[in-house]
């Protein structure tokens, strides 16, 4: 069994901790809703060892990150429109 590429491992950890968890703080349904689902999604792919599969999972994480950013931008705009003091 080949060892896991340390460069990919650091990319996965950065995608989870530094990017997606950070975005989840302001998720409209709350961080308590967002975090367990994110953790479950990452744990579902914890057994992936192939570098190509890991890259495809990172691409999926990037897609989720972009979608989350879009929904947060939309949510913040609507929130500010109806409650301008937040």
Image: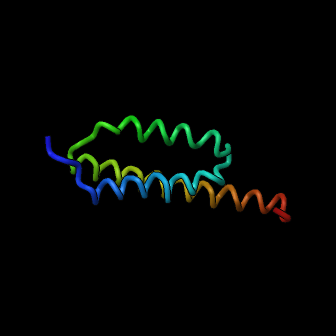
| Image spot of residue 40 (x, y percent) | 47, 36
Q: Is residue 76 left or right of residue 48?
A: right
Q: Is residue 27 above or below residue 45?
A: below
Furthest toward the left, the residue is 1
| Image spot of residue 59 (x, y percent) | 35, 54
Residue found at x 19% / y 47%: 3
How many numbered marks does the figure carry?
0
Residue 63 image-quadrant placement: bottom left
Residue found at x 44% / y 39%: 41
Residue found at x 84% / y 59%: 83
Report the front residue among 6 and 42. 6
Quarter of the figure with the N terminus: top left
Picture colour scheme: rainbow
Quarter of the figure with the C terminus: bottom right
Q: Is residue 1 left or right of residue 76?
A: left
Residue found at x 50% / y 42%: 38
Report the front residue among 34 and 71. 34
| Image spot of residue 57 (x, y percent) | 33, 48
Furthest toward the bottom, the residue is 85
Report the front residue among 5 and 50. 5
Q: Is residue 36 above or below residue 6?
A: above
Q: Is residue 4 left or right of residue 21?
A: left
């Amino acid at each position: 069994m080949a060892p896991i590429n340390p460069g990919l491992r650091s990319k996965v950890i950065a995608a989870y901790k530094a990017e997606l968890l950070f975005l989840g703080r302001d998720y409209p349904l709350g961080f308590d809703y967002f975090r367990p689902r994110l953790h479950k999604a990452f744990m579902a792919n914890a057994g992936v060892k192939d570098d190509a599969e890991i890259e495809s999972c990172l691409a999926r994480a990037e897609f989720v990150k972009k979608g989350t950013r879009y929904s947060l931008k939309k949510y913040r705009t609507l929130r500010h429109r109806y409650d301008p003091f937040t």
